[in-house]
Image: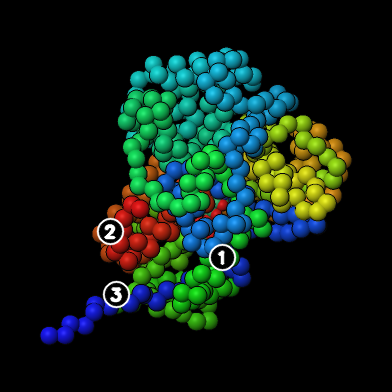
Amino acid sequence: MYKAPQRPPPLPQVVLVEGSERLGGWIRSVRGPGGAVFELGPRGIRPAGALGARTLLMVSELGLDSEVLPVRGDHPAAQNRFLYVDGALHALPSGISGLLRPSPPFSRPLFWAGLRDLTTPQGKDTDETVHSFAERRLGPEVASLAMDSLCRGVFAGNSRELSVRSCFPSLFQAEQTHRSILLGLLLGAGRTSWPDSALIRQARAERWSQWSLRGGLEMLPQALNTHLTSREVTVLRGQPVCGLSLQAGRWKVSLGDSCLEADHVISALPASVLSKLLPAEAAPLARVLSTITAVSVAVVNLQYQGARLPVQGFGHLVPSSEDPGILGIVYDSVAFPEQDGSPPGLRVTVMLGGSWLQTLEARGCVLSQELFQQRAQEAAATQLGLKEPPSHCLVHLHRNCIPQYTLGHWKKLESATHFLATGRLPLTLAGASYEGVAVNDCIESGRKAAARVLGSERDS
Ligand SMILES: Cc1cc2nc3c(=O)[nH]c(=O)nc-3n(C[C@H](O)[C@H](O)[C@H](O)COP(=O)(O)OP(=O)(O)OC[C@H]3O[C@@H](n4cnc5c(N)ncnc54)[C@H](O)[C@@H]3O)c2cc1C
């Protein structure tokens, strides 16, 4: 008897709805004079770990291999990071010998912080602020200089409010499983499955610390758009979702003048935005999501002709005790000189935020471009000796751009997950508001959400 070959199930019809006219969200690259590339948002993606490898695999699938600009392990931008403390730049120590030597601004070699970690008993709390965790395990100086700066560099946030469990899960898990950060990081969390590709092998062999794309990171969402539209995905731009309602178990997605119907919604909106769109039956979820707030960052891209940096490295961070407004300065030209334009000009990016910006926002002050430009140029002059006026300057205030995983964030996630599981709401959450703000984390959250909806969730 003839048996017809089994056809794969048809792919669901997918519609991507974007509120603005441009895809990419905070990923935005603009061209300056002579073709120089200026990143207004993220500027480097880490290749490390399973997540880093999956993003590189996607880069290859999108045909972007030849556009990748790697920062190899032996490059100064991979090896040197600085703290600006007491009016001077200090190189952060690297390697075992670096831990044994005195390393200002720390009063003692960091070896002592390591010893403290090895001899401190395991904490008992289900969550702790980053500051309290670092102070307990590594000492007050590491907490108030290094971890304070790291929280500002990654989250533009306050280490005394952010959760170690949610912001630095590998540190939290290291203590939980091995009683010590050092032991945990050395012994590892066990192997997760990684994809394999020529690009991933190259990144591992050359010990890349990060990578970008020749025309800027915005090439990634642009290539994704081309790929998706060639696969019958409908991409709607300039159509902000203004409401979600449920009718007989199906979503009605309101887009101003028109609306869509959907069996399932994957929301990659910021949690607080989604909270305002949900229908009354999802009120408990909306309440939880509304508590996941975000902070603003002002990004000032500066270019200087004929200028030199006093040091070579990725950039420097500034602890809140030194300057509550300047989070740090990235030396873009060191990591990616290919993006300097012609004739090449030195590019740096000053990030402003922290309590200084929060106070200005709370007071309703006028946040003018001039204010940020002046603060940024002053910082570049004082901290890097770039005293001549820049040849090119871009100023952008990104409002509510980085979600804050404050103490107890994990409970919010648990409560949201529980509501979605028990309420059987056909909704899946993705994006930076939940489990990691880095580009890799956001891509992974999207991949997992799609796999869950298609019923093909797996680790690889
Ligand atoms: C200044 C800055 C520097 C950073 N540097 C790095 C870095 O170097 N490396 C790194 O890995 N990460 C970095 N990050 C973090 C990372 O870039 C972000 O966390 C990530 O890009 C967020 O992606 P997302 O898709 O979750 O959210 P978003 O980028 O916020 O995207 C959300 C999208 O939803 C759209 N939207 C909003 N409301 C609606 C609506 N009602 N209807 C329809 N659409 C809507 C928005 O227009 C936007 O396109 C940086 C972030 C910032 C702000």
- Mark pair 2, 1: CA separation: 34 Å
Q: Are marks 1 and 3 in contact (CB under 8 Å)?
A: no
Element on which disc 2 rests: helix
Q: In this rendering, would 91 be left or right of 158? A: right
Q: In this rendering, would 159 be left or right of 366? A: left
In the rendered view of the protein, which quadrant contains the N terminus?
A: bottom left
Against 24, is 176 above or below?
above
Q: Residues within 10 Å of mark 1 (few under 14, many from 20)?
A: some
Element on which disc 1 rests: helix
Residue of label 2? 421
- Residue 60 rendering spot, x and y as whole percentages: 51, 58
The amino acid type, in three-letter code, at marker 2 is Ala
Against 216, is 12 above or below?
below
Residue 344 vs residue 309, the one in the foreground: 344
Residue of label 1? 223
Q: Is residue 457 visible?
A: yes
